[in-house]
């Protein structure tokens, strides 16, 4: 059986002023269709770089990213990214922001009415249909991130890439959005990769958690399967044995075996 | 007795002050918006100070130029001798004898063509310089040198090239106003957040779509700053260019009036030029504010 997404011996190094710094070294990972995988690690370990490689925004130095056995060498809508700071275009309304993506991806295959329905379906999915005519500056951070998710989903991606999507949000909004993402994932079964630095978030949302070692030349230290049944409810899980065991495993990895050394530079 | 009394006061006290208080607050807010006295007060506070300054300036000027051997005419003489120019901006008595508003319009037409071309070419070149590091390395030094050339220094060359005064004047406008447009657009394009570029890459926008849908709106505040400087410069240049090339524009009118020693006419023409330049500046600023609404807020 071939994997849906395969990261095949990926190295990534940046050359800056004659100095080559190795960021990622020998990353090997396979992800199945419909899986929700989190990548966790200390800041500076190259997790965002890894996501950019999968998105195609940066090129690998060695190895390959294979999506359905095809090599990823440029960004495209089948690998939609939800950026940490939402990246909505401020001069467009919520509706227009999604329309920009939808008319580019489905401009030739769907009629205008179909595209309109599709935009509204995705806005409904993130419960933002009421704000369709608002500009990003007029809505809250959590709402912006919802629209960012709707824009990514509207591209009908093969893989949804979330780059610390809730990092800039307060704890309550974050919990709401996590629930929304879980709900969407269960409904659409979208293959999802999420970058995070939040242990609870990783355990709550993921099927598997990929733990990165510290840079330079970071690699995958451990992969933890989270054998929790879905749908998951955060209140019930807070005392669940399996949840706590997974949480402990991740914490041990991050704070015992791969402690973050502040003065690494 | 006592219980009833409490109930009574409750019933009366609660709804009575709460509701009307809200209603009053709302109507007061709404009323304040359309309050004619408030608007009049605002108008007065913006119009009265400049009016006072202008009156003081006129009085000083009148006193300074009242002596019989003064070299410049006082305001009263300007009013008397150039009254037809002030009162009738749109008269038309033949090819060279027309009102100042017509002359301003003719000059504005040249500015419109020259500045319009400069805006289009300037935004395109600015986008190129902002987008491509090699275009910047190649073009930027050339631009930096050329932009310091004074507008009128281009005139002899353009007269030689176009062999006609009107296209030469338009060329001078173009070459004067294009530099701030190029430079500001380039800065705006260079400052487009990396995230917007990533969004366009993921959507696979082509060059034209990226230019129209991301680059121009994202750089719009910078572009309009450049356009505003550009329109000011081109209005400066047109008057000087027309003085040398002739024709029927406002610039040539001043030169003509000087040659026939009609100083009051010159002063009236200066006022026309100033007011027109002010209006042009405000027009571009207003267009910029309209177009970039929403872009400035993050």
Image (cartoon, rainbow, N blue to C red):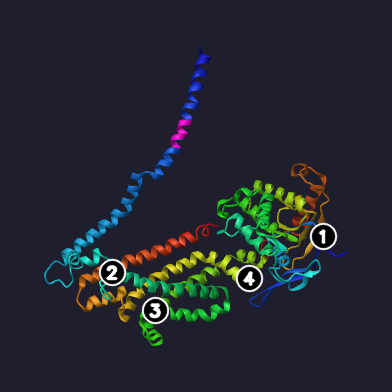
Residue B26 appears in the figure: yes
Judge from the rendering whether residue A201 lies leftward or rightward of residue B78; answer left or right: right
Q: What stretch is highlighted in magenta?
A: B19-25
Between marks 2 and 3 in the image, the one whose residue lies nearer the viewer? 2
Which quadrant, please, contains the C terminus of chain B?
Answer: bottom right
Residue under label 2: B100
At 45% from the left edge and 38% from the top edge, which residue is drawn?
B26
Q: Residue B206 carries which label?
A: 4
Q: Is mark 3 on a helix, strand or loop?
A: helix
Q: Mark 2 lies on which chain?
A: B
Give the residue at the far left of this rendering.
B68
Q: Mark 1 lies on which chain?
A: A
- Disc 4 to disc 2: CB gap under 8 Å: no
Quote the CA–CA distance across marks 4 and 2: 49 Å
Q: Residue A32 carries which label?
A: 1
Q: What is the crowding at mark 4: few (fewer than 14 residues within 10 Å), some, or many (at least 20)? A: few
Asked if badges 3 and 4 are on one and the same chain, I answer yes
Q: Of label 2 and label 3, which has the lower sequence position? A: 2
Quote the CA–CA distance across marks 2 and 1: 78 Å
Residue A178 image offset from top left, x and y in percent: 71, 50
Residue under label 3: B172
Asked if badges 2 and 1 are on one and the same chain, I answer no
Q: Of label 4 and label 2, which has the lower sequence position? A: 2
Between marks 4 and 1 in the image, the one whose residue lies nearer the viewer? 4
Q: Is residue A208 magenta?
A: no
Q: In the rendered image of this protein, does residue B15 appear above or below residue B75?
A: above
Between marks 4 and 2 in the image, the one whose residue lies nearer the viewer? 2
Asked if badges 1 and 3 are on one and the same chain, I answer no
Quote the CA–CA distance across marks 4 and 1: 32 Å
Q: Which chain carries label 4?
A: B
Q: In which quarter of the image is residue A215?
A: bottom right
Residue B100 image offset from top left, x and y in percent: 28, 69
């Amino acid at each position: 059986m071939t994997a849906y997404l395969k990261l095949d011996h990926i190295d990534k190094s940046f050359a800056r002023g004659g100095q080559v710094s190795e960021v990622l070294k020998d990353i090997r990972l396979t992800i199945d269709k419909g899986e929700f995988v989190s990548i966790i690690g200390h800041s500076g370990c190259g997790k965002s770089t890894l996501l950019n490689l999968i998105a195609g925004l940066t090129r690998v130095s060695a190895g390959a990213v294979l999506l359905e056995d095809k090599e990823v060498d440029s960004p495209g809508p089948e690998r939609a990214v939800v950026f940490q700071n939402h990246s909505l275009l401020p001069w467009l309304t919520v509706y227009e922001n999604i329309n920009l993506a939808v008319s580019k991806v489905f401009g030739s295959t769907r009629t205008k009415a179909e595209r309109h329905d599709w935009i509204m379906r995705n806005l409904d999915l993130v419960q933002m249909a009421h704000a369709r005519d608002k500009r990003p500056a007029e809505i809250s951070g959590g709402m912006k991130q919802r629209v960012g998710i709707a824009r990514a989903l509207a591209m009908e991606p093969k893989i949804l890439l979330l780059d610390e999507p809730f990092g800039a949000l307060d704890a309550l909004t974050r919990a709401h959005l996590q629930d929304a993402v879980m709900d969407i994932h269960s409904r659409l079964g979208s293959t999802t990769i999420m970058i995070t630095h939040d242990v609870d978030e990783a355990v709550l949302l993921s099927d598997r958690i990929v733990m990165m070692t510290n840079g330079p030349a970071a690699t995958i230290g451990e992969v933890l399967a989270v054998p929790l049944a879905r749908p998951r409810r955060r209140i019930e899980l807070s005392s669940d044995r399996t949840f706590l065991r997974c949480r402990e495993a991740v914490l041990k990895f991050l704070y015992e075996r791969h402690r973050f050394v502040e003065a690494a530079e | 007795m006592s219980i009833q009394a409490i109930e009574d006061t409750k019933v009366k006290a609660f709804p009575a002050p709460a509701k009307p208080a809200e209603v009053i607050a709302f109507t007061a807010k709404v009323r304040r918006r359309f309050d004619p006295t408030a608007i009049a007060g605002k108008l007065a506070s913006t119009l009265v100070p400049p009016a006072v300054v202008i009156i003081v300036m006129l009085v000083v000027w009148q006193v300074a130029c009242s002596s019989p051997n003064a070299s410049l005419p006082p305001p009263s003489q300007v009013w008397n001798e150039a009254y037809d120019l002030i009162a009738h901006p749109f008269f038309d008595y033949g090819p060279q004898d027309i009102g100042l508003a017509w002359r301003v319009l003719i000059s504005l037409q040249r500015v419109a063509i020259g500045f319009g071309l400069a805006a289009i070419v300037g935004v395109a070149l600015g986008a190129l310089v902002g987008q491509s590091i090699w275009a910047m390395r190649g073009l930027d030094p050339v631009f930096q040198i050329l932009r310091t050339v004074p507008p009128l220094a281009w005139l002899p060359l353009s007269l030689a090239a176009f062999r006609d005064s009107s296209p030469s004047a338009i060329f001078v406008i173009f070459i004067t106003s294009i530099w701030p447009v190029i430079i500001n657009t380039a800065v705006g394009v260079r400052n487009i957040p990396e995230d917007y570029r990533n969004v366009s890459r993921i959507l696979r926008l082509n060059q034209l779509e990226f230019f129209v849908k991301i680059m121009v709106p994202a750089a719009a505040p910078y572009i309009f700053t450049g356009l505003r400087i550009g329109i000011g410069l081109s209005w400066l240049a047109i008057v000087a260019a027309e003085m040398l090339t002739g024709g029927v524009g406002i610039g040539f009118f001043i030169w003509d009036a000087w040659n026939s020693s009609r100083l009051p006419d010159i002063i009236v023409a200066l006022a026309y030029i100033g007011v027109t330049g002010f209006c042009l500046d405000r027009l571009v600023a207003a267009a910029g504010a309209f177009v970039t609404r929403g872009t400035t807020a993050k």
